[in-house]
Image (cartoon, helix red, strand yellow):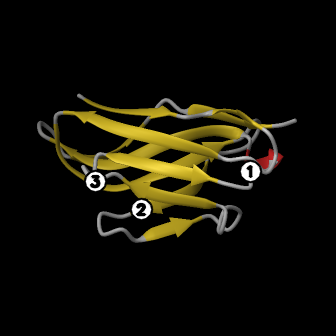
Amino acid sequence: QVQLVESGGGLVQPWGSLRLSCAASGRIFAIYAMGWHRQAPGKTREMVATVSTNGNTNYANSVKGRFTISRGPANNTVYLEMNSLKPEDTAVYYCSALIRAQSSGTENYWGKGTLVTVST
């Protein structure tokens, strides 16, 4: 069984910073692309940032220059450094990863999400 567990969410003031972490565990054969998505109240889930196995990154226009995605040295973790946070960044942030499990094929897995609230 494969699991993704996020951490690092919380309440932060506008222009503040937060760092989200996500760790993959379980019977994993290989981890390919990893990423972060978010869903604000009343809105659909949207891509925030993705990172490939060779380090190529992709960002939503709304977060370019403020957020940075990176992978840990063991390649089973992904981070999202968020700076200059705005109230409109408030959302539940979900980690995703394209994983080939040991006992099954390749599929996209999701974490349960971590809430980020940007407010005074």
Give the residue at mark 2: 51
Mark 3 residue element:
loop
Residue plotted at (40% across, 49% down): 78
**Mark 1 vs mark 2, CA separation in Å:** 21 Å
Q: Earlier in the sequence, mark 2 or mark 3?
A: 2
Give the residue at mark 3: 73
Task: Residue 99: give x, y in percent of width and height.
Answer: 27, 47
Q: Earlier in the sequence, mark 1 or mark 3?
A: 3
Horizontal relation, residue 67 to residue 26: left or right: right
Horizontal relation, residue 107 to residue 87: left or right: left
| In contact (CB < 8 Å): disc 2 and disc 3 | no
Which residue is at the front of the view, 16 or 39?
16
Image quadrant holding the C terminus, namely: top right
Total number of numbered discs in the rendering:
3
* Amino acid type for the residue under numbered disc 1: Leu
Horizontal relation, residue 101 to residue 15: left or right: left
Mark 1 residue element:
loop
Residue plotted at (42% across, 40% down): 22
Image quadrant holding the N terminus, namely: top left
**Mark 1 vs mark 3, CA separation in Å:** 26 Å
* Amino acid type for the residue under numbered disc 3: Pro
Identify the disc placed on residue 4: none
Task: Residue 58: give x, y in percent of width and height.
Answer: 51, 68
CA neighbours of label 1 inside 10 A, class few (<14), some (14 to 19), many (20+): many
Give the residue at mark 1: 85
Residue plotted at (52% across, 51% down): 80
Which of pointers 2 and 3 indicates the residue nearer the eye? 3
Is the residue 115 above or below the residue 69 in the image?
A: above
